[in-house]
Amino acid sequence: MYKLAVLDIDGTLINNKGKISQKTIHTISDVQKSGGIVTICTGRNIRKALPVAKKAGIKVPIACIDGAVLVEPETKKIVEGLELSEDEINLILSAANRKEIFVELNTGYIYYKFAENEKEYHYDIFNKRTIVGRVKSYMGGIRYLKNWQQLKTVAPPIYQIVIAGKTDIIAEIKNRIQQGDCSEIDIREHLWDKYLFINKKGGNKASGVERLCNYFGVTMSETVTIGDDRNDIDMLQEAGLGIAMGNAHQNIQEIADYVTASNEENGVALALEKFLLKK
């Protein structure tokens, strides 16, 4: 019997308009009333994830930044966080210095972003660089830095660094990082083409789900995970039951144990009904 369901947000819990359907909200409530646990594991940072958890009626700890941070939605208290050390941050930034790249530092609540040239900002896919876009980004916890030196003065904790650029430049930066003391760093380059996602070891969704299991006293075999994208693959594979959304790419669906309906068709609600409510 499955006791815990861990949900991705984008493309999974929310529809294409960024909303959670009423059916999904009611179904999550029904699972909770039945004694089951529903929570989130998302690539979003804390600031971007908390409003979704509140809307979904989730009050137990959630995992953010691809599992690097566990946080209590009501108190906003960080239960556990995998911070990059000062030496690791310096190693990563030194490897990327003076390159034509886009860089993003994630502190849990704020994204700090910088590109050497305006053209590199096209890697910042969530901002079209309009005035309205910049205002919305600022309100949403995004800060654009004016120079490289400001990146080095961002106050800790830093849970993730994202670097994007041309393929050869990204390969060179990865190689330089690996020449240093990176034994406690994970570098993921399979999530998006031309991007490096750099976390402390264990900063991935499978590890995040495992830490959630430990917190709730549930085993991985008693856990259902639901997602739609590349960063969900490891948690789909490691959980007792990995469920892909109907809108997920074919290769995501192929590694899943089950495929539910899309995020436009109440796929999460239907999966919860089937496997946790046994409807």
Image (cartoon, rainbow, N blue to C red):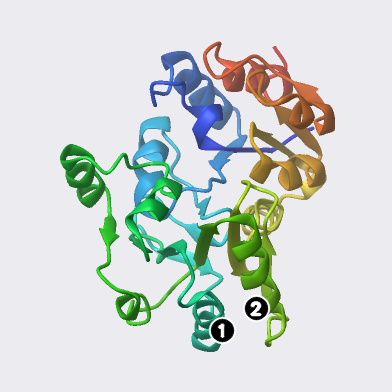
**Image vertical order of residue 11 relative to residue 98, above or below:** above
* Residue carrying label 2: 177
Tell whether label 2 touches label 1 (CB within 8 Å). Answer: yes
Residue at x-position 76% and y-position 24%: 250
Q: Is residue 202 visible?
A: no
Quadrant location, the C terminus: top right
Q: Nearer the viewer, residue 265 or 71?
A: 265
Question: Mark 1 to mark 2: distance in Å?
Answer: 6 Å
Residue 233 is marked as none
Q: Is residue 277 visible?
A: yes
Look at label 2 and name its amino acid. Ile
Question: Where does the image place residue 176, in percent across and percent down from the top left?
Answer: 66, 79
Residue 91 is marked as 1
Residue 230 position by quadrant: top right
Question: Where does the image place residue 268, in percent across and percent down from the top left?
Answer: 59, 23
Residue at x-position 21% and y-position 51%: 138
| Residue 170 left/right relative to 26 | right
Look at label 1 and name its amino acid. Leu
**Image vertical order of residue 111 relative to residue 244, above or below:** below
Residue at x-position 65% and y-position 14%: 261
Label 2, residues with CA under 10 Å away: few <14, some 14-19, many ≥20: some
Label 1, residues with CA under 10 Å away: few <14, some 14-19, many ≥20: some
